[in-house]
Image (cartoon, rainbow, N blue to C red):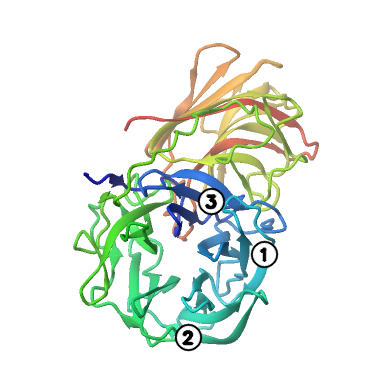
Amino acid sequence: MSRNVIRNPILRGFHPDPSICRVGEDYYIATSTFEWFPGVRIHHSRDLVNWRLLTHVLTRKSQLNMEGNPDSGGVWAPCLSYDEGIFYLIYTDVKSRQGAFKDTPNYVVTSANIEGPWSDPVYLNSSGFDPSLFHEANGRKWLVNMLWDHRSNNNSFAGIVLQEYSAPLKQLIGPVLPIYKGTALGLTEGPHMYQKDGWYYLITAEGGTQYNHAVTVARSRQIEGPYETAPNHPLLTSAGNPGLELQKAGHASLVHTHTDEWYLVHLCGRPVKDKYCNLGRETAIQRCIFTENEWLSLQNGDNYPSSTVEGPDIPEQPFPAPPERDDFDSPQLNVRWSTLRVPADESWLSLTERPGYLRLRGRESMSSLHRQSLVALTQQAFCCTAETLLEFEPEHFQQMAGLILYYDTKDYVYLRITHDEELGKCLGIIRSKDGVYEDSLCAQIPLPSHVSCRLKIVLNREFAQFYYSIGDQSWEKMGQSLDIYHLSDDFPAYIRFTGTFIGMCVQDLSGAFVTADFDYFEYKELPE
């Protein structure tokens, strides 16, 4: 039987920091969601080739309260594991990340079912980020995380530490043990521990999350060390090879298949222009082997990521493609939708007040770290189109609603309906680029009252073209094509970690909580 071919990335668009877990013949990947709610996406596969978005873990405010969290804060690097009938999910909720200090409380939640319900969180520690849980063969459990050192003239990435976790007591016990300082690549983080043939293998991310990112492997006969770095270090990187399709390869997690094969999932980025990755950091997979001297190695024979990979000895098991159109006929949001920082609730979002419509109440601005009324999904293809039909009757210039391309509070492009003292109800484009606001990109178009308006965006790599249609009229261009390379992890100079979302939003800066009704949302991928 010929093997299936896996085409990378397996999770396209914003799906970073993958943690893979096998239970029987089912495979699950948890990925970071940062300030987007619900927290921690779970994808499911039965063949490592085909994946579907199955569920989220952190679905209640009691599990994840991100009001006020900074851009690219929130959920970092979750770790999904399974032991004796229980799923464990470890995560960081980053409350501050700029400057010398980082506030990084770490938690664990559990469930007997991957689809929940998941428990309320148990607090673990705050000493650093990227925690993971290792289930030792003898039954003991260990938390490993990177240690953050805020002191001047010290290495902020102070190495990997280990501490025992008591499941019955629901707390960490015993001493904190430093076990690995990392290599000359530096920025040692993202630890995952594995056990095989008498060895403890420690996999870490190094080199930072951008173009020098890498995967390091070290091992020891004792869990507390000392750990020896692999002679083929780094196991995986894209550094120094700008021709690769998959850049930024790093932050990896290992899985042993039920067919006795080994695979490594890792994050990557695909530049759309120069070094700008509008889709954010994605998840890819590589086939691995253990060598005669028991070191982990990529099957392709080098340390660069491959765009196509030989699949495992498992018959292909595809899933139905997700529908391109959401008509909002269900009383709950589809699993693909995300909101910013806070859960969707009836105070600002309803699918039942007007059946067949998504009704949003305007709240705070696109700059808010607290209560935005925004519903969006990840952009997963370089070339795609999205459209919606909007019914909205603003009475003030502080009231807006429409179709938005959103990276974070500093970078977005927004086709929105508002009210102007001279034009009345009107349509225009506003943009924020590194926090600089613009609303004169094109002339505003007057709109008739009490008539619906369709809004559309067509994305072609780093360019976006907006369109509109009044009532049932034909589509008209709105302004010129816009360069959107700034909607990327790599713009501007400071580091951030998410990706471009496409969605619907409403703002009412007057505090009147005006409503807007969206009849449908359609997202289609286009050939490149």
Q: 357 or 446: which is nearer to us?
A: 357
Q: Position of residue 385 (x, y in %)?
A: 45, 29
Q: Residue at x 36, y 69 (%)?
A: 207
Q: Which mark is residue 178?
A: 2
Of tags 2 and 1, the one toward the viewer is 1
Find the residue positioned furthest to the right: 512
Q: Residue at x 29, y 63 (%)?
A: 237
Q: Residue at x 59, y 50 (%)?
A: 115
Q: Which mark is residue 206?
A: none
**Can residue 522 be seen?**
yes
State the quadrant of the N terminus: top left
Q: 42 or 244: which is nearer to us?
A: 42
**Under tag 1, what secondary structure?**
loop
> Which circle's residue, 2 or 1, is located before the other in the chain?
1
Amino acid tagged 3: Arg
**Whole-Å distance between the Cαs marked 2 and 3?**
31 Å
Q: Is residue 201 left or right of residue 498?
A: left
Identify residue for label 1. Answer: 121
Task: Classify mark 2: residues with Cα within 10 Å, few (<14), some (14-19) or many (20+).
Answer: some
Q: Is residue 36 left or right of residue 177?
A: right
Residue 285, image quadrant:
bottom left
Task: Classify mark 3: residues with Cα within 10 Å, few (<14), some (14-19) or many (20+).
Answer: many
**Whole-Å distance between the Cαs marked 1 and 3?**
17 Å
Residue 525, image quadrant:
top left
Identify residue for label 3. Answer: 41
